[in-house]
Image (cartoon, rainbow, N blue to C red):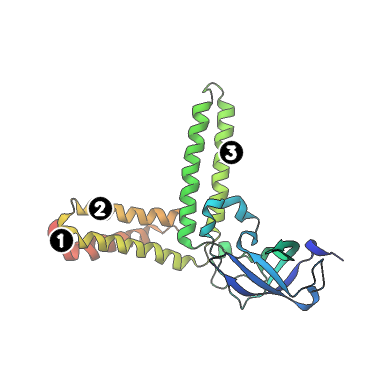
Amino acid sequence: KPQGEQVIRTGFIKWLDFPKMCGIIIQDKKYRKVGPVKTPKVFLHFNDLNPEIREFIPRTDAHLLSPIINKEQRIQFQASAQMVGGKETMKAFNVRYIQPLLHRSPVTCTGDIPVLHWQDSLNLIRKAKASLGHDVYMVLANQSMNDKEKTAEQVNLALEKCNRKVTWSRSQIVDSEKCALGCKARLGEDIFDLLSNIATVDNVERKADEAYFRCLGDLSDLDLKLTPGQEQALKEYTKKRLLLKSYGDFF
């Protein structure tokens, strides 16, 4: 029988401390005497929920971690003996829901525990694209243009790195409909600010277009693209319903 770290354990998350990014798992009775530390409680740190976290979220962005935890759903995990707070205890890693979260996007309908709010996913995607630009710049700055094959290889590696981070960030989206509504709500906030200061704003139509395309860009980054009909409806709502209806004299 597998022992210690190899054992796939089951249980539920009992307690969480989001500021300290940790929690406690209560493991099922049959696993409490498996491994070097015999205990019903297993320590959990957000960084160890899945191995991708350490790959895609640097220490400087660790504060973004905000796991979507449903305590009613059972989990499976592995654990190893480690020192925590001066005591030897079992520490969990590779923590997953046994059943996927309800209402999750079909593309991301897995047992992985989402660890990012959609806005943080969007910020991480933007950072990945910014890093791609920096990496490509450095490749072009340091490579002789005569060595086209090596240059192309390094650019492709940078693109693959960016795509992995973007794909993972998108996989953290739990409810794509709520995410899309959130993006549109931000558009509404931009339009509200525009209307509130319309007397001092030059070229209102251009500002409305910028807000509209910013919203489309956010939706695209999160892989929540609208159909042409939906795009047109959103644009009409942005310009006619919110602006032309109330402030037609400015156009």
Picture layout, residue 67 above or below residue 251: below
N-terminal-most mark, 3 or 1: 3
Residue 207 shows which numbered tag?
Answer: 2
Give the foreground label among 3 and 1.
Answer: 3
Residue 60 screen position, x and y as percent: 52, 51
Residue 130 horizontal side relative to residue 249, left or right: right
Mark 1 crowd level (few <14, some 14–19, many ≥20, 10 Å Cα): few
Q: Amino acid at mark 2?
A: Lys
Q: Amino acid at mark 1?
A: Gly
Q: Residue furthest top?
A: 146
Residue 11 horizontal side relative to residue 150, left or right: right
- Residue 227, picture quadrant: bottom left
Residue 10 horizontal side relative to residue 62, left or right: right
| Viewer can see residue 223 | no
Q: Which residue is mark 3?
A: 157
Distance between the alpha carbons at the discs numbered 1 and 2: 15 Å
Distance between the alpha carbons at the discs numbered 2 and 3: 37 Å
Residue 18 horizontal side relative to residue 82, left or right: left
Mark 3 crowd level (few <14, some 14–19, many ≥20, 10 Å Cα): some
Q: Residue furthest front?
A: 86
Residue 155 screen position, x and y as percent: 54, 35
Judging depth in this view, the residue of 54 and 203 nearest the camera is 54
User: Which secondary structure, mark 3?
Assistant: helix
Q: Amino acid at mark 3?
A: Leu
Q: Which residue is mark 1?
A: 248
Distance between the alpha carbons at the discs numbered 3 and 1: 50 Å
Residue plotted at (60% across, 76% down): 71
N-terminal-most mark, 2 or 3: 3
